[in-house]
Image (spheres, helix red, strand yellow):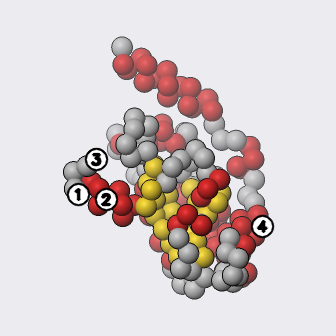
């Protein structure tokens, strides 16, 4: 019985697809958001622009490299069954963070976060950029997994779909056996 319920849920999620507005790259919007996320103007305009370009382009590169042809939860199933090489949310976050770090940005702090750690929904990981020295809560969520390679981004407080917790806190809690 649970298998039929699972298949029904997966079928529903597969029908959801990617919102069309997510398929259109808003590099200018992301660059503006990155540059203006800090009132002290610690983010260099050229770095904001370069980070936005990379975030969009690299998410699409990951889509191709991970052989994504389905919505994220179905792709996850394929990865877990060994039918796809990579593409779990933490792969997207690890790879995007590594790619952005290679640029040697001076204007940004990198944060990692996890959501859905204590409920039945699928746990989710992401990378967040904030102005250098600013807390994660003041940053921008960069999520390539959510729409299968079509970058989602938003200031963290505006990403109401997930409640993000710093990854280090999640890992510390797990080491204590509290989760």
The tag earlier along the polypeptide, 3 or 4, is: 4
First of labels 4, 1 by sequence position: 4
Mark-to-mark CA distance, 4 and 1: 41 Å
Q: Nearer the viewer, mark 2 or mark 4?
A: 2
Is the residue 58 above or below the residue 124 in the image? below
Which residue carries the number 2 mark? Answer: 171
Q: Position of residue 159 (x, y in %)?
A: 61, 51
Indicate which label's residue lies in the foreground, 4 or 1. 1
Residue 102 locus on image (x, y percent):
51, 79
Residue at the (52%, 66%) spot, across then down: 136
Placement of the N terminus among the 4 image quadrants: top left
Q: Which residue is mark 4?
A: 28
Q: CA distance from mark 1 to mark 3?
A: 9 Å
Q: Are marks 4 and 1 in contact (CB under 8 Å)?
A: no
Left or right, residue 173 beside residue 159: left
Query: Badge 3 local density, few (<14 within 10 Å), some, or many (20+)?
Result: few
- Does residue 160 sit above or below 142 in this rendering? above
Q: Is residue 59 visible?
A: no
Residue nearest the observer in this picture, 105 or 75: 105
Which residue shows up at 48% across the image and 68% down it?
A: 111
Q: Is residue 74 left or right of residue 29?
A: left
> In this orientation, does residue 156 appear?
yes
- Given contact means CB atoms under 8 Å apart, are the residues at marks 2 and 1 in contact? yes
Q: Which residue is mark 1?
A: 175
Q: Which residue is mark 3?
A: 179
Q: State the separation of the CA atoms marked 2 and 1.
A: 6 Å
Residue 47 image position (x, y, % from top left)? 66, 80
């Amino acid at each position: 019985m649970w298998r039929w319920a699972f298949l029904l849920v997966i079928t529903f999620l597969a029908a959801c697809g990617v919102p069309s507005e997510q398929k259109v790259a808003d590099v200018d919007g992301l660059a503006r958001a990155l540059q203006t996320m800090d009132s002290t103007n610690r983010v260099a305009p050229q770095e904001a622009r370069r980070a936005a370009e990379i975030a969009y382009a690299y998410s699409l590169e990951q889509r191709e490299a991970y052989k994504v042809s389905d919505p994220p939860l179905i792709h996850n199933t394929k990865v877990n069954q060994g039918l796809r090489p990579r593409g779990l949310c933490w792969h997207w976050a690890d790879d995007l963070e590594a790619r952005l770090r290679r640029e040697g940005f001076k204007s940004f702090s990198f944060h990692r976060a996890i959501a859905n750690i204590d409920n039945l929904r699928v746990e989710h990981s992401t990378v967040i950029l904030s102005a250098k020295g600013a807390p994660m809560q003041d940053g921008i969520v960069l999520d390539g997994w959510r729409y299968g390679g079509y970058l989602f981004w938003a200031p963290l407080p505006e990403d109401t779909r997930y409640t993000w917790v710093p990854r280090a806190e999640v890992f510390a809690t797990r080491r204590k056996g509290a989760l």
